[in-house]
Amino acid sequence: MKDYPDKMTTEQARMFQDDVLNIVGQIPRGMVTTYGHIAALAGWPSHSRMVGRTLRYSPEARLLPCHRVVNVVGRTAPGWSQQRVLLEEEGVGFKANGHVDMKRYLWEPLL
């Protein structure tokens, strides 16, 4: 794992997890946001991968719309084919390359 210059303490990691889960819970139906946007909103812009880990390993995340989180180019999570189905059910459109149309469906709350 990469050693970040702005490494978190245990307490900061707990707060980061809480912030990530709170932000994901706010993503509107029919919209998506990115791991990087969530990390930045949580105050740790270089920790987008940690957002993904938080969503994968936090039991609380199962109750949240994690399917609304994609990477910066709109690609869905590898190995989670149901993610696209869930997004399409909400009206999210995809481009021919299989990525979410980020110009149309990106939710960017103010930082």
Image (spheres, rainbow, N blue to C red):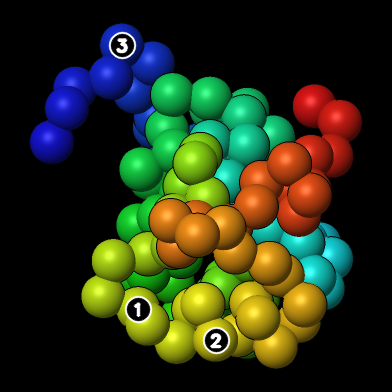
Residue 91 coordinates in the image, percent (x, y): 77, 77
Q: What SS does tag 3 mark?
A: loop
Residue farthest to the top, as pictured:
5
Tell me the kind of residue under disc 2.
Val
20 lies left or right of 29: left
The circle drawn on residue 5 is: 3
Q: Which residue is mark 2?
A: 85
User: What is the distance, in whole Å, between disc 1 and disc 2 at their CAs?
Assistant: 10 Å
For image coordinates 86% across by 31% down, the residue present is 110
Q: Nearer the viewer, mark 1 or mark 2?
A: 2
Of mark 3 and mark 1, the one earlier in the sequence is 3
Q: Furthest residue to the left?
A: 1
Read off the residue under disc 1: 80
* Cα separation between marks 3 and 2: 38 Å
The residue shown at (44%, 38%) is 48
Q: In the rendered view, would you say 57 is above or below 89? A: above
Quadrant in which residue 18 is drawn: bottom right
Q: How many marks?
A: 3
Closer to the camera, 17 or 49? 49
Select label 3 or label 2 by which is in front.
Answer: 2
Q: Amino acid at mark 3?
A: Pro
Q: In what quadrant of the picture does the C terminus appear?
A: top right
Give x and y (percent) for residue 107.
79, 48
